[in-house]
Amino acid sequence: MKLFHYLKYFFFHVIGLLSLGTLLAGGDYIILGFVAIILFYVIGDAIGGDDTSTPEYNNAGILTFQLWLALPLLALIVFSAVWAFSAGDALGFGAWVSQLTGYDVLAAKAQNGIGHGVAAVLLTGLMIGMIGTIPAHELTHRTWDKISMFVGRWLLAFSFDTIFSIEHVYGHHHYVATRQDPATAPRGRNVYHHVVASTIKGNVSAWNIEKARLQRINKAVVSWHNKFLRGHAMSLLLVAAAYGIGGWQGALFFIACAVWGKSLLEIVNYMEHYGLVRDPQEPVQPRHSWNTNKRVSSWSMFNLTRHSHHHAQGEVPYHKLRPYPEAPMMISGYLTTILVTLVPPLWHKLMTPKVLHWDQHYANETERKLAAEASLNSGLPAFEQAYGQQHIRSQNA
């Protein structure tokens, strides 16, 4: 049983290998693979129940190595995807795979059409978000570990988001659930607005954080010491590599996958903190993040689901995060909740009651005043109706 608690996190790698296989199989297999992964999460979280176990681990090095494995896995997935939708056979990769497996991937590649290309972008971007951002999120919190930071930042480079290692760790965790946090979506905002707004403001925040750091240590802002600039250069190198594999077609395909992968991160930011408020003078507590303990999401996403504990104690490694079943809960697991965010009317219908419940049962007195103000500025009738002027005056009395 103890061995299983290590093995369960390999669900993450199995999903990645399944995606790799469908990309190489080509044609309708790509569409089927993408749909199968979505259904696996949606149905699995719906029927799999919650995982609230907190096992003890004596070999933390294995758990870290599982995270490190994400980099070669993601590199292979992205290379295969770019190769599959580019002319030629870069590095003789197709001939080698065909000889190794007995499956003619070159013939399969020749049958790929526009619809398959769209599915491949969606699938590869999903893998950039999952195989890239999720372990990178864990690794870049380990600021004392040079190897983990190296692996984490390269994983983020696939989504043009190395600034996440700056803004998330030193900005978001400090300002979460306040107006100063680009990643916290205010009440009434839709996810499409949030993806753009959070991306722009997150980059500005990361630049300011890095600029202040360099000034403190008397280093030039525009220099190799600047992790903001160096990180975006890493992403440009990956674009250049995609160009080397498949010319402009390969580069544009990779850019589309990367932008979708980055968008997924901002969608996750959106659903992890939507509508929550916090007094900036108060410490971050588990109630300031939406949580979920769905088994499939937890096992295959390195406990990213236990977000309430993560924000209360950002330095705690993923295998030590507690489930906090009393914390405010998301709609369901991560993929299911992502799908709901993409339909704003459905999102607001399901989330507005949850946010109002949070106001009543989780918020302190100061936060209730902040919640009332946020609700009146939300533009949503349900929030405005819940917080009429008479209710506001009674709270301020």
Image (tube, helix red, strand yellow):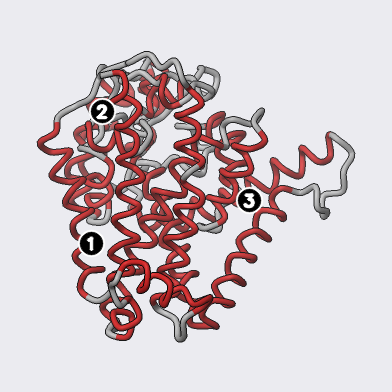
Please tell me which of labels 1 and 3 falls first in the chain.
Answer: 1
Please tell me which of labels 1 and 2 falls first in the chain.
Answer: 1
Q: Look at mark 3 in the image and give the residue it sits on.
A: 204
Residue flagged by tag 2: what amino acid is it? Asn
Q: Where residue 82 appears, x then y in whole percent?
A: 45, 72
Q: Residue furthest right?
A: 218
Q: Nearer the viewer, mark 1 or mark 2?
A: 1
Distance, label 1 to label 3, CA atoms, is: 37 Å
Compared across the picture, whether 37 is left or right of 279 comes to left
In which image quadrant can residue 337 be found?
A: top left
Residue flagged by tag 1: what amino acid is it? Gly
Distance, label 2 to label 3, CA atoms, is: 33 Å
Distance, label 1 to label 2, CA atoms, is: 25 Å
Give whichever of 181, 47 is nearer the camera: 47
Q: Do the residues labelled 1 and 3 touch (CB within 8 Å)?
A: no
Give whichever of 183, 230 is nearer the camera: 230
Q: Name the residue located 25 percent from the left edge and 54 percent from the top edge.
A: 344
Q: Is mark 1 on a helix, strand or loop?
A: helix
Q: Name the residue located 51 percent from the left edge and 41 percent from the top edge.
A: 68
- For label 2, the crowd category at 10 Å Cα-Cα, with few meaning under 14, some 14 to 19 and many 20 or more, is many
Q: Residue 33, labelled with which disc?
A: 1
Please tell me which of labels 2 and 3 falls first in the chain.
Answer: 3
Q: Look at mark 2 in the image and give the residue it sits on.
A: 293
- For label 3, the crowd category at 10 Å Cα-Cα, with few meaning under 14, some 14 to 19 and many 20 or more, is some
Q: Where residue 89 appears, x then y in whole percent?
A: 46, 81
Q: Which quadrant, please, contains the C terminus?
A: top left
Q: Where residue 321 appears, x then y in whole percent?
A: 39, 21
In which image quadrant can residue 274 be found?
A: top left
Whether 277 is drawn above or below 134: the answer is: above
